Image (cartoon, rainbow, N blue to C red):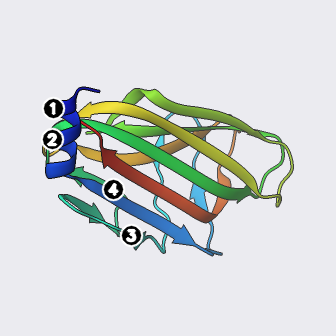
């Protein structure tokens, strides 16, 4: 990173955070051909500067163009055994190619962790959200107990 980029990031910081702490409510995700937006009740707004968050929609809107480090962590359990679960960040309704994770949930009721992170060029007005899908023939109940979705402008 050049000195100019470091100075720009420091003088025009932008960051946002949504998190979940101790959720016990489950959500149902339909059969897995299409991604479903992760809408978990109980999102809390963390630190926010020069971005906007929606607690109801679980999304973050970027207000300053730049390179952003995006980090997502989830501790969740499923109501179904042996499910392959895909988690991805979407920008303006399109899957970000570098922000995707696949995880096999082998045991129902057991808490598994999913983490994904990467760097993306984002523009003012871009909206980020997290979506999931699975390989099960029927719908799957998921309980996201803890989560953190954060973005940090780095250049």
Q: Looking at the image, tell me whether mark 2 or mark 3 is earlier in sequence order.
A: 2
Q: Looking at the image, tell me whether mark 4 or mark 1 is earlier in sequence order.
A: 1
Residue at (44, 47) in percent of width and height: 130
Q: Looking at the image, tell me whether mark 3 or mark 1 is earlier in sequence order.
A: 1
Residue 67 percent across, percent down from the top left: 26, 34
Is there a contact, CB below 8 Å, between mark 4 and mark 1? Answer: no
Residue 83 percent across, percent down from the top left: 75, 40
Q: Which residue is mark 4?
A: 59
Residue 58 appears in which quarter of the rendering?
A: bottom left
Q: Looking at the image, tell me whether mark 2 or mark 4 is earlier in sequence order.
A: 2
Is there a contact, CB below 8 Å, between mark 1 and mark 2? Answer: yes
In this rendering, the answer to whether 2 lies above or below 71 is: above
Q: Which mark is residue 46?
A: 3
Q: Is residue 88 left or right of residue 134?
A: left
Q: Is residue 138 left or right of residue 154?
A: right
Q: Which residue is mark 2?
A: 8
């Amino acid at each position: 990173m050049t000195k100019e980029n470091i100075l720009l990031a420091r003088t025009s910081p932008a960051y946002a955070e949504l998190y979940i702490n101790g959720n016990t409510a489950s959500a149902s995700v339909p059969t897995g051909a299409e991604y479903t937006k992760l809408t978990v009740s109980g999102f809390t707004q963390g630190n926010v500067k020069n971005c906007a968050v929606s607690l109801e929609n679980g999304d973050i809107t970027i207000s300053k163009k730049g390179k952003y480090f995006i980090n997502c962590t989830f501790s969740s359990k499923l109501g179904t055994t042996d499910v392959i679960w895909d988690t991805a960040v979407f920008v303006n309704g399109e899957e970000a190619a570098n922000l995707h994770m696949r995880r096999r949930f082998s045991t129902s009721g057991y808490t598994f962790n999913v983490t994904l992170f990467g760097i993306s060029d984002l523009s003012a007005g871009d909206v980020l959200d997290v979506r999931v899908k699975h390989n099960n023939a029927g719908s799957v109940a998921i309980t996201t107990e803890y989560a953190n979705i954060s973005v940090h402008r780095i250049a």
